[in-house]
Amino acid sequence: MNGVPKMVVKMSSRAKKYETLDIMKEADIYIAASLKVDTFNAYRYTFDANTLISVGIFDRRERQRILMKPSLIEQEYRHLIPAILEHEREKTIKKYVEKNDYYRMLNGQPALNDREVIYLDIDVLDKYGYTEDPDNRTPLHQLPSEILLAMEADGILSELQEQYPHKKYISYVGSRKIPIVEARRAHNFDLLYFPKQDDNNRFYRDFLFFYEEAREYFTSVIYNHNFGTRYEYYDGFIGLMILTMTIQRMISSLFKVVVDRDFYDLATLRLFLESFGVPFMEIFTVQQQRMLVKNLNILILKKQSTQVMYDVLDLLGYDSFELAKYVLVKQHKMVQANVEADYKPQFVYKTITREDGTQYLELDSSASFDYYFVRLDMKDPDIKLEDITADNAYTYEEVTGRDPTWINDDDLAEKLEKTDFNFVETKYADVSINIRMQEKLFELVYLSRMILDKHKDTNAIKITLARVSDNPFSILECQVFLICLMCKMTTMVPKILRKPSQILTVLGFNFHEDAERIKEEIIKVNDEYKYKYGIDLFDMDVLDYIRNVTFKTAKDVNDFYVNVKNFEEFMSYAMITTKSVDAYHAYRKLYNTLMITWIDDETYQDRDGNPLFRYDEYLKALNPELYNFYNKLTSEECPDYINYIGTKFSTIFEDTEYMGMINIGDATLIEAIIEMIRTFKSLTIDIRDMDIVYVFDSRTRNTMRLFSKIESMTATLNPKELMCKYGDYVSELQETLRPCDDMLLKSAEKFISYIYPKELNNTLYEKETFVTEYRAIDYLFRVYDDLGHDLGAVIETKDTMQLTDKGHCVFCWEGETPVIVGNTPL
């Protein structure tokens, strides 16, 4: 309810006091122009020579002719109507002056007859980064909105309101400033402003909903316009009744809130969790705390079970975590009689003397058995024991040595020796997470560069950070704020790298390139390659991922990020699987063209075009209010706001996976997660520690390929090397070998067909005296390998082969059939 004193409600009766017919006409024209619902006919007889010049009519006589007869625009210059309409709209909006003092007050402007202008001290303005010319001062209400918002946060506007109590407009120059169009179009008692809170805040959503219901009821059923003009306080009374009904319905809804456990603020969430003995972790986001509260009954019901630990991680949004348990294995020691023998269990016996002096042999367990731990998945029902040398096996001392509660005394040793077991579950468990850094870095880097590189678009997309301010911020401002927070947390200088010598590569989608031109170039190059070699150079599906884009909403950013991610996967797969070196280099060039960008100096500039060299300076230029908030934070407070903004981004960019885990590696967060698991786990489970494995597995950058651009080689083959009788008659032949394995095998098939010519089949030669197919193929591969190391190998493109036997016979390969030419020696 803290927002109620700051709320702004439209009172139509106050606006009517200052309204006249002429003022209403001017306002209607202004509203139509602002909403772009006006038409050319509204300006048909008002546009002037400057308008015609702006649309490209530079001939003076032609301008005079059109101004004397405006209908010529519709007859001869119809194509200029949209440009004229847009020019007149801008002119109308620019010259409009609101003359109704009520709407001026709501817009943070002094009354028309107010001649007492308020100026702030130059020193105060310098504090907020606003430099002013002493000879040309700027009035309070004309200062930039970001400066006024920062002053409001620091309490300066409240001080001015107390100093000038009769100047009501001072209360509306900051966050409560209402645009003229919005104020004029609002209905009576409409809620024009209410302090912005998190959209997940149940109180905020319910208040807006119940207020609108109450307003609709009173204005349509109770309100009497005649009473509004007759009684001075009638409108104020109706407004009070609307607010009273809203609060009553809010109180009535508390029963449902308690059932849903959809509480309003962190204080209530803290009390609820602590009342059940659940620790309140400051580092968790509000949404994470709400999820714990809403599902607390289920967690308590499953407490001390294995499943509850998975439920806790899932509710906190860390489903990539893994839980493992440790089992103690008792296994015979294995020995070898000799080097060549197999391993066999070792049985060692010791001599035991009875009380009567007789002796007997007893198995010495300490010398016959090994004890070690095996790490297994917590949910694994099928336990497969590993050898002590396995990766997930740990020595007995390695696990128990650092546990002060594990007492290695004689009683324990005797219990282990006398108890028959293969394995037994222990109290030990741990938490681990595999973070695929390639995917995480790709998302964080490419998404952030999208926001920065398309700064002109993303600066117009607003989101709310209720924990920071009631005012919305652009996603560009939030991104720069996030960068500054991460630098402060890690004590890094928020420096903007600009020099080429400081930058190896800038990862990010290259918006500087014309997508349509690139698509045309791909089609052209592919057609040329296909004409020359008969195959495609590119998979033409790549064209679907290349397009120019304009960001208007957060969804546009999200959708294009998904497109870039799919494009990267497509290109990686194409480069990994292609067998053509030409295709590989073509894909690599396209990848480097679109997936690597450069620093645009225009991005990092202040309002006057001066270059900026630090991200905190950039934040100050974008939003002084956010900059002041950032300066007040300590490095210890940064992780909480990093997680908060990351969670916000993961909500508006719904197809991202890691935005809510930006700060996942923070030690404080890890301790909080383990502490929450320990709260609900069984008392018989001891969470030892938490392991984080960072996996760098970029297929694009880690793949190594070996290519050959040789199309064919002429090889001289000697069948005599195969020791076959037919080789006596065919002493050598020449074959065109292809580098690809499948083409080489086809060459082997041809070669074998020469060794076994159907036309020369004769019973005088036994089958075993001829070369086998495997020997022929092996021979060809050896020849191919030798040629690969011979720099003098002749490269050919002909698919022909000739076989000669020193003039005895000649075979020519024509198509698929060997043809005999001349006399044979047989």
Image (spheres, rainbow, N blue to C red):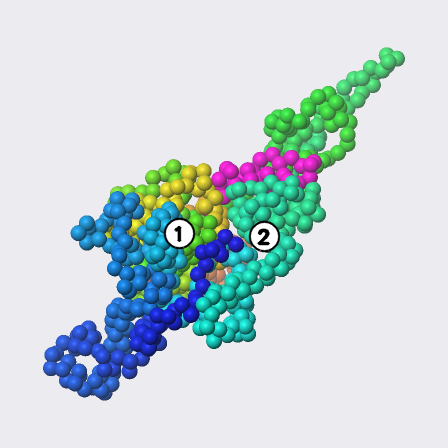
Q: Mark 1 is on which residue type? A: Cys
- Residue 540 found in image quarter: bottom left
Q: Residue furthest right?
A: 356
Residue 490 lies in the magenta stretch: no
Q: Residue at x 29, y 59 (%)?
A: 512
Q: Residue at x 46, y 42 (%)?
A: 639
Can residue 730 be seen in this snapshot? no
Q: Position of residue 406 (x, y in %)?
A: 67, 27
Q: Residue at x 75, y 34 (%)?
A: 421
In this image, 548 relative to 2: left or right?
Answer: left
Can residue 204 be seen in this snapshot? yes
Q: Nearer the viewer, residue 362 or 110?
A: 110
Circle on res. 478: 1
Q: Residue furthest top?
A: 357
Q: Position of residue 664 (x, y in %)?
A: 49, 43
Q: Are marks 1 and 2 in contact (CB under 8 Å)?
A: no
Q: Residue at x 58, y 47 (%)?
A: 269
Q: Secondary structure at mark 1?
A: helix
Q: Which residues are magenta?
A: 662-690
Mark 1 vs mark 2, foreground winner is 2
> Where is the C terminus found, in terms of image quarters?
bottom left
Distance between mark 1 and mark 2 Cα atoms: 26 Å
Q: Mark 2 is on which residue type? A: Phe
Q: Nearer the viewer, residue 489 or 764?
A: 489
Q: Secondary structure at mark 2?
A: loop
Other residues around mark 1 within 10 Å, as few (<14) / some (14–19) / many (≥20): many
Circle on res. 117: none
Q: Position of residue 350 (x, y in %)?
A: 76, 19
Q: Position of residue 223 (x, y in %)?
A: 51, 72
Q: Earlier in the sequence, mark 1 or mark 2?
A: 2
Q: Nearer the viewer, residue 495 or 19?
A: 19
According to the image, label 2 marks what residue? 263
